[in-house]
Image: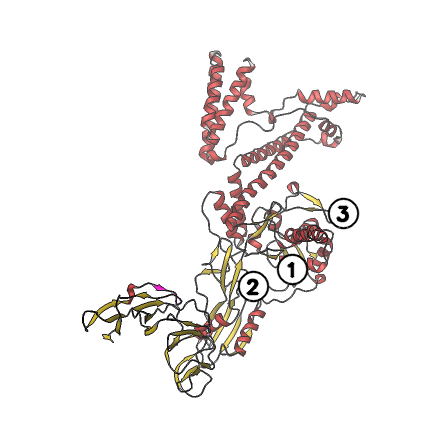
Amino acid sequence: MADAEILYEKYFLEYASYAIKKRAIPEIDDGLKPVQRRILHTLFELDDGKYHKVASVVGQTMRFHPHGDQSIFGALVTLANKDLFIDKQGNFGSILTGDPASAARYIECRLTPLAREILLSPAITEYVDSYDGRNREPVTFPAKIPVVLVLGAEGIAVGMSTRILPHNPIEVVQAQIACLKGEGFQLFPDFPTGGLVDLSEYDDGHGKVLTRAGLETGDTGTIIVRELPYGTTTESLIASIENAARKKKIKISAMSDYTADEVEIEIKISRDAEPEDIIKGLYAFTACESSIDTSLLVIKEGHPCRVTVTDLIRHSAVQLRDILRAELKIEEQVLRKKLRAEQWEQIFIERRVYKDIEEITDIEVVYEVVRRGVEQATISPVVDPMDKELDELHGSSPEVRSAVRSLLTTIHRSLAYAEYGPSRDMIARNLDTIRTVSPQEQRTIRSLLNAVYRDLNQEIAAVGSEDLTPVEDPTRIVDITTEDIDRLLNMPIYRISRYDIDQAGLEMIDLKDRLQAVRRHLHHLTSYAINFLERLVADHKEAYPRRTEVTSFTPMDVRDAAERDLVLRYDTEAGYMGYAIESGEPLFNLSLYDRVVIVRAGGIVGVHNVLDKLYVDLDILYCKMEDPDQVFTVIYRDTEGYPCIKRFRLDRCRVNQLYELVPEDGTLLEFIWEADPTIVVFCRTDSDDTLQEETIGAEDYEVKSHRGRGEQMVEAVVERIDVLVDMGEGVET
């Protein structure tokens, strides 16, 4: 027992966890399984814009993947045929025909621009050691769209499985946009093979979908397959059609496959067949119609989690904001560092700080001279415009200057972000501070306020208040670091001699504008995310049209599609019924898929589908095709002689099993198959020998199970029963 517990805890659980998290179930953050992620990571490492031999990509991926090259090659081909992240060159097989790809040494691939735009962001990607510790691989990619919905996924793990249907990339992105805007959205599967899909039993990623091939009728007695149901190929579809024709389920004379880039299978029908009947047979007996069970299971925070399509869209919308925020923060840091370096360089050259250190031999003194020379400098292109205006208040106290700056900034933020509540309090405090200044200072402050209002109103009229940013300058000079000084001291002499102050000023203005744009995006992150997604839609809309038509249809029943060419006969002398007997009275035609309801004498009923030769008794009450909606009525006498009625359907009967419609202690009086008959009950009274008549409508009684007991009609002993049936032109007894 102890060994079994060790085996379970150490090995089985480890294997189950590995199969679930590392092989079968995709990750919610980037929608990829580990092998797919490693393939794309390898392509990112190799990416130079050119095609790479697939054999080389597979070999490089083996550095990260503990399994063999065949598993990697198969996953790469499958991923490439999704036409999303991998640009392929050569024969990668066909998802339409099922043809395999050429050998890895003959085909090439590279990343698509969409892959770089959606997945690639090394600065914010978390990496871990590979299985052997020699390399680093990403935990997940920072995916900007829900990749798992676009690619789809299938996997069977220990005790669980997932089947996620693919969706149209453009529709997925549009759903993200709607989610970010707070609008409702609906998202339906879209298959690369086209076809028709019924989603009446589909529930936001779970449930069942029905798929059909796209069929059209030709002009010369042909039926052409233009689109395939999801999960089939032309090879498997043709095999199912040939099998149905061989079993004489459909009447076709020939079939030709002209599939290349588009599906085209031509089916020639027999001369004595109708195209409508053949189409029904194709949906009923072949792979032209199929049912797919779906289950949306992903790995979330290290654990398998059952989610919906809506959950994935919302998760991706939040994740997109986080990714864009992280990327903007990094870009802001880079721009700040670059702008600061440009500032130090301009000051170092324009103020000729390098001349001040020519004769100095002490390195510490050099550092101090450079630091002092740079920090004391004032360079107009990088001075805050607000500080330049505040120079008019140079004689004012620091408290007043600070209050004016805070006042101007607060007003700007209030107009930009509509945050009037907190801003009004801050404005009031600043106004209290500057009320005691001189009239000249008040006029200057009033002029500054008017200028700010005027400039802001112009910006608001041009772009809208939502796109404005605080007026505070993000390029304000900070303390110079030792690293900055080292870079200045190592500057080549030709750089100093060829330095263009005007050009440098323009470059810093450009950097400042870019930095302000980044800060604006950070303040309006949702709008920035929406703009990013809208650009994706505009750039790639033409490449990803919808292929699958969402419609509504009922699954084709084989009994409706099968040809009824068999004659059911009943031999009253021998008591046998079937289509294989030669004697007896012909009843009606049927197919091998039909089911027949037979009611024997005494009230014994059965639903049968094996009707080649069946003993049914010498006398029967009823024999017709099964109709689940048919309501039957049985009238019987109980042990006390009282009449009872039972109404029922035969929609829950086991096939080829007999049921008694009358209780063991009862006697069958009438079996009625017409709808809503009128029943006349004749009962003998105790007072005299006359018959009392009472008319009863069968529709007044509830339709129950065929196994239930009936309800008593009258409290008297029944003598006779008459049944009145409306035949359309009168009443018949």
- Which label sits in the foreground, 2 or 1? 2
Circle 3: residue type = Arg
Residue 81 lies in quadrant? bottom right
Q: Which mark is residue 231?
A: 2
Question: Real-space Cα distance between discs 3 and 2?
Answer: 39 Å
- Nearest the viewer among 197 and 181 is 197
The residue shown at (45%, 45%) is 183
Question: Real-space Cα distance between discs 1 and 3?
Answer: 26 Å
The residue shown at (55%, 66%) is 262
Residue 4 visible in rendering: yes
Graded by Cα atoms within 10 Å as few (under 14), some (14 to 19) or many (20 or more), the crowding at tag 2 reads: some
Image coordinates of residue 449 in percent, x first then y, are 47, 22
As helix, strand or loop, the secondary structure at mark 1 comes to helix
Residue matched to label 1: 77
As helix, strand or loop, the secondary structure at mark 2 comes to loop
Graded by Cα atoms within 10 Å as few (under 14), some (14 to 19) or many (20 or more), the crowding at tag 1 reads: many
**Residue 681 within the segment the image draws in magenta:** no
Relative to residue 547, is residue 584 depicted above or below?
below
Residue 724 visible in rendering: no
Q: Which of the two discs, 3 and 2, labels the residue nearer the N terminus?
A: 3
Relative to residue 128, is residue 273 depicted above or below?
below
- Nearest the viewer among 535 and 553 is 553
Q: Which mark is residue 134?
A: 3
Q: Which of the two discs, 1 and 3, labels the residue nearer the N terminus?
A: 1
Circle 2: residue type = Gly
Q: Which residues are drawn in magenta? A: 703-709
Q: Residue furthest bottom?
A: 583
As helix, strand or loop, the secondary structure at mark 3 comes to loop
